[in-house]
């Protein structure tokens, strides 16, 4: 029978694995937050928010620099 050798990871490889795990957890948290924000946005009464959104968009438009020709 073939035997499988268990290789020990050096500290640098171990640190890289931990870093990758932290990255995955952070991305999962971001995805959950974005999902919650999407659900909230879908559930708001858009007719009621129409004037408010229009006002904020016009204020944002005033802040955007104009293109120079």
Image: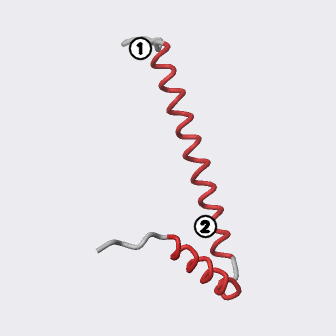
* Horizontal arrangement in the rendering, residue 41 relative to residue 2 (left or right): right
Question: Mark 1 packing: few (<14 Cα in 10 Å), some, or many (20+)?
Answer: few
Q: In the image, 1: left or right of 36? A: left
Q: Which mark is residue 61?
A: none
Q: Which of pointers 1 and 2 lies earlier in the amino acid sequence?
A: 1
**Residue beneath the point at 60% across and 83% down:** 54
Query: Which one is in front in this view, the residue at disc 1 or the one at disc 2?
Result: 2
Decide which of 66, 42 is in the foreground and name it.
66
Q: Which residue is mark 2?
A: 38
Q: Is residue 35 left or right of residue 4?
A: right
Quadrant occupied by the N terminus = top left
Q: How many marks?
A: 2
**From the viewer's perspective, is residue 11 above or below residue 49?**
above
Q: Separation of disc 1 and disc 2 at Cα? A: 48 Å
**Which quadrant would residue 34 be assigned to in this image?**
bottom right
* Picture residue at 52% right of the left edge, 71% below the top: 63
The residue where tag 1 is placed is 4
Residue at position x 54%, y 33% from top?
Answer: 21
The percent position of residue 17, horizontal first and vertical second, equals 49, 26
Residue situated furthest left in the rendering? 69
Residue 26 image point, x, y percent: 58, 42
């Amino acid at each position: 029978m073939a035997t499988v050798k268990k290789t020990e990871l050096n500290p640098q490889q171990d640190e890289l694995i931990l870093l990758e795990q932290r990255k995955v957890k952070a991305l999962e948290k971001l995805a959950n937050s974005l999902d919650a924000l999407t659900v909230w946005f879908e559930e708001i009464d858009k007719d009621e928010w129409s004037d408010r959104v229009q006002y904020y968009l016009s204020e944002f438009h005033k802040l955007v620099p104009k293109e120079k020709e």
